[in-house]
Amino acid sequence: MSASAIAPSVHSLWTTAAPATEKFPTPHIEYAQLSPTLIVFGVAALGVLVEAFLPRKSRYTAQVGLAVVGLAAAFAAIVALAEKGYGTTKAHIAAMGAVAVDGPALFLQGTILLVALVAVFTFAERRLDPKAHGRHVDSFAAQGSAVPGGDQERAAVRAGFTTTEVFPLLMFAVGGMLIFPAANDLLTLFVALEVFSLPLYILCALARRNRLMSQESAVKYFLLGAFSSAFLLFGIALLYGYAGTVSYSGIASVIDGTAKTTPALASSTQNDALLLIGLAMVTVGLLFKVGAVPFHMWTPDVYQGAPTPVTGFMAAATKVAAFGALLRLLYVVLPGMRWDWRPVMWGVAIVTMVIGAVIAVTQTDVKRLLAYSSIAHAGFILAGVIAIDKSGVSSVLFYLAAYSFVTLGAFAVVTLVRDAGGEATHLSRWAGLGRRSPLVAAVFAVFLLAFAGIPLTSGFAGKFAVFKAAAQGGAMPLVIVGVISSAIAAFFYIRVIVLMFFSEPKADGPSVAVPSPLTSTAIAVGVAVTVVLGLAPQYFLDLADKAGVFVR
Amino acid sequence: MNPANYLYLAALLFTIGAAGVLIRRNAIVVFMCVELMLNACNLAFVTFSRMHGNLDGQVIAFFTMVVAAAEVVVGLAIIVSIFRSRHSASVDDANLMKL
């Protein structure tokens, strides 16, 4: 008998079999349910290839076509998923627990895709700027790397270069934004945040006119954005240290005390500091992206300096994505902690509404005015977030959809009012605009009334829904502050309308450029959504209500 | 050695980085301080990973490194472009837009 035959039995006298080493399981990805995001990223990658291989002349058409088709296809995929019931009955968590496919995610992704589709139209606009050397140019720098006013830039303009890279950058940003509100673990949240932030930093730096201001806004946005994402990441580290997992449901069950205890967990959950500081830091990172008040400093500078189409896209889509992520974090991970975070959020919401509205009164630049108004609106939306019940979710979803189209339309109108130096954004230049071009002024007035929340516009329906949810959630003082700051905000919106319609136009005032059908479509969509959501909000409120349940 | 000491070190590094972002005026140095904060996060992740005995934290550290690298690419491009047009990387000189 050979030694090898007895060896195992002898061996087993003084050893025991170790459990088989844990293998990494093959990830199981539900491609069909992730198709909207995958389509957008695929188109973005194709856009990079187009930049690399197509001759300069045909790039613009190819990029715009790709972007429009990609976004439309992704939206169709969202609708198909919603039709199959993934928003309601079949809601579940895909991609090994990384991404949630549920009502709020699909609703917000659909909103982001529509906003991006309209934004592509404003990005592609080429009739507003005067022709440079016989070629139509858009609002982006001829060559991003060239020094403003330098020889290289002049050569690039003479050669008719345009930065068609903005379309792939936009698509990458949209892809990140699609994942952000659907992220179901903190790692995915962080990666999605960076994926949509990094392209936005670059887009901010690419204005054709006022490039120094544009670059300055990019540096400010980048440094502050990186700073805030470092806070977010440290918060994630602390939450991981507390719960031993980064998945939302895992952390929630540890907070509730229903998780299976291990010795490590037993010692780490004794330390509430990890949980509280982690929660605070993650919230800081998200509130920065939202533009809520202690973390709003970047908003006016970035909105003013960035190319206006980018500002419109950023103001609308980033807010949708960031509020989606904030909602999911607070409603899925941290409902057990609501007695800790609600008072803080109350404070943030009140300060945001009041400061946004009050400082906006003193502004003299249209883009800065809209930036402060977006801060005030972040406060209104936060009031709905605080409600912490189902109506809170659905009212915030509706508000985001309504608000994003108003913002996009308003910034599209800002691109039209121009003088020799590009866009005339100083408010004094807008005096008497209603006399000179009644249509543009009237459209802008509609958007301003919607911002102010005047009945028969989408702004009123949204504000009503949000404040109603907040009042039902027991946040009555918040509603009172909200109504007062809406009144303050209405003052400066109405002031702009008065300025446009009831003051004498200046002799050397700005002219209103005649846009191509692209920008006209964008503005028309903005007006249409504003009016339809104002006159007949019920269908969309029901839609948001049906979509208002998170999967856990 | 008690792994909690690494957490104190991570918190210290994070604080140094945050203080640097707020105090230093050169955009590159500010950016380096942000990177220091990200690395402090990595240290915390790896330490917690060890304390909990699972691999999540170590895997996240790799993701953080990749993200930090991507951030360097974008950030340095922006900082270099503003340096070339202004011959200064000071964040105090970037003051075209004020209230």
Image (spheres, coloured by chain):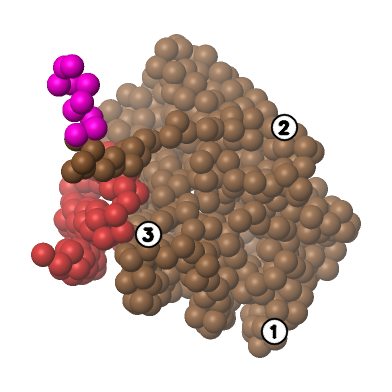
Relative placement, left or right, of A416 versus A289 is right
In the image, what residue occupies the spot 24% across and 32% down? A9
Which sits earlier in the primary sequence, circle 3 or circle 2?
Answer: 2
Which sits earlier in the primary sequence, circle 1 or circle 3?
Answer: 3
Give the colour in which the image draws chain A. brown
* Residue numbers of the magenta segment: A1-10
In the image, what residue occupies the spot 80% across and 48% down? A528
Given the image, on which type of amino acid does mark 3 rest? Gly
Disc 1 from disc 3: Cα separation? 34 Å
Disc 1 from disc 2: Cα separation? 39 Å
Given the image, on which type of amino acid does mark 1 rest? Gly
Q: Secondary structure at mark 1?
A: loop
* Residue hosting label 2: A76
Q: Secondary structure at mark 3?
A: loop
Q: Which quadrant of the view contains residue A389?
A: bottom right
Judging from the image, mark 2 belongs to the subunit labelled A
* Residue hosting label 3: A244
Q: Is A134 in front, or is A69?
A: A69
